Amino acid sequence: MATIYFYEKPGCINNTRQKKLLVAAGHHVVALNLLTENWQPDSLRAFFGKLSVRNWFNYSAPAIKQGEIDPENLTEHEALALMLKNPLLIRRPLMQVGDSLMAGFNQQAVDNWIGLTEIEIHPDMESCPRPLAQASCSHE
């Protein structure tokens, strides 16, 4: 099985569920704080591979939900600059296995990438299930 460097927002409900799925499949998860990592444009960009810029974003981030940022109209350079200033904008999790990188947690893509066993497919393991106004998420 794989050792996965898993960049998360500590306390995120979905990141916790995602890590449990990975561990249940026999993988070793090394959890890292996405928000405090010293990201550089090139190192962050590498996680997004061939994804379109709009798919680099965490649509549960308050700045997006409140309409302050529109990921649909950003260049790669603009998107990376915004993410470096506000890591909550980064789609979670970012995962690394060896030299292979992935952003987001599409269960089928993760299964194809490193394998998941006896998984229950959840329709959405990326969007925050909590309402924006809920106190425990207000620090996002």
Image: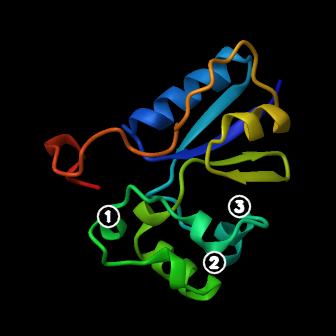
Query: Is disc 1 in contact with disc 3, using a CB cutoff of under 8 Å?
Result: no
- Judged from this view, the residue extending furthest toward the front is 123
Q: What residue type is labelled 1?
A: Lys
Q: Is mark 2 on a helix, strand or loop?
A: helix
Q: In the image, is 36 to the left or to the right of 80?
A: left
- The first of marks 2 and 1 along the sequence is 2
- Kind of residue at disc 3: Phe
Label 3: how many residues lie within 10 Å, few (<14), some (14-19) or many (20+)? some
At mark 1, the secondary structure is helix
Quarter of the image with the C terminus in it: bottom left
Q: Residue 65 shows which numbered tag?
A: 1
Q: Which of marks 3 and 2 is nearer the N terminus?
A: 2
User: Separation of disc 1 and disc 3 at Cα?
Assistant: 23 Å
Q: What is the crowding at mark 2: few (fewer than 14 residues within 10 Å), some, or many (at least 20)?
A: some
Q: Which amino acid does label 2 sit on?
A: Pro
**x and y percentages locating residue 124 in the rendered image:** 52, 38
Residue indicated by mark 3 = 47
**89 on left or right of 99:** left
Q: Is 33 above or below relative to 41?
A: above
Which residue position is annotated with label 2?
41
| Residue 81 coordinates in the image, percent (x, y) | 51, 83
Give x and y (percent) for residue 77.
61, 87
Dot 3 falls on a residue whose secondary structure is: loop
Tell me if residue 10 comes above or below residue 120 in the rendering: below
| Quarter of the image where one finds residue 118 | top right
Mark pair 3, 2: CA separation = 11 Å
